Amino acid sequence: MSKINRYVFVLWGERFEEAAAAIFVTELRKAGLLVKLVGLDSGHLSGANGLKLLPDLTLGQALLRATQAICVIFPCRSADIQPFNHDPRLREFIGQAQASGARFIIKSAAELEDFELGLCPMVYPEGEALLEFAAELAQVLSAMQ
């Protein structure tokens, strides 16, 4: 029987936090996890500080792997997700990942109930504590593989 690949998806949208996205992608890949940066819009999206990151997958491509999600990371505040609130693909992606037992991580969950998905995400810290958080997350997710 072949092993099922489990993915960590780092979502990437306009004005998301590029430093957090880069830290999560780098630290989790260093730990040997399959990490994909997922573009919520087409093209090269600029982060909160103007840095453009090239996604590995489009949201449509990630949707095909949503049931293989072990973790979904939103490198942003929940308010930054609101422009995507009515995208049925994102709702389906999150629903499938949630049904598969994926963990959800975000910077601030204060307004996430407005997204109406019933998520209970972990909240990641800011600044230097983010590196330690990402390293600890890598250990937890590696143990779940």
Image: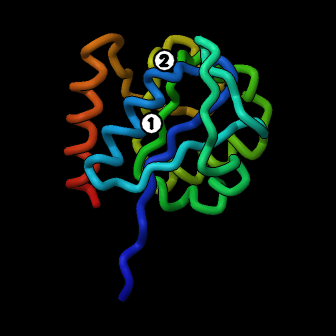
Residue 45 spot, x, y in % from top left: 70, 29
The furthest residue to the bottom: 1
**In this picture, residue 136 sits left or right of residue 55:** left
Residue at numbered disc 1: 104
Residue at numbered disc 2: 109
Query: Which is more toward the observer, 87 or 37?
Result: 37
On the image, which quarter does residue 22 sit in? top left
Compared to residue 122, the image places residue 125 above or below, namely above
The residue that appears at 38% across and 21% down in the rendered structure is: 123
Q: Earlier in the sequence, mark 2 or mark 1?
A: 1
Compared to residue 102, the image places residue 107 above or below, namely above
The residue that appears at 78% across and 39% down in the rendered structure is: 42
Residue 89 appears in the picture as rendered: yes
The residue that appears at 32% across and 11% down in the rendered structure is: 127
Query: Which is more toward the observer, 111 or 41?
Result: 41
Q: Secondary structure at mark 2?
A: loop
Compared to residue 113, the image places residue 137 above or below, namely below
Inspect the image, locate mark 1, and give the three-letter code of the amino acid beneath it: Phe
Inspect the image, locate mark 2, and give the three-letter code of the amino acid beneath it: Ala
The residue that appears at 29% across and 47% down in the rendered structure is: 30
Q: Residues within 10 Å of mark 1 (few under 14, many from 20)?
A: many
**In this picture, residue 102 sits left or right of residue 49:** left
Q: Secondary structure at mark 1?
A: strand
> Total of numbered circles in the picture?
2
Q: Residues within 10 Å of mark 2 (few under 14, many from 20)?
A: some
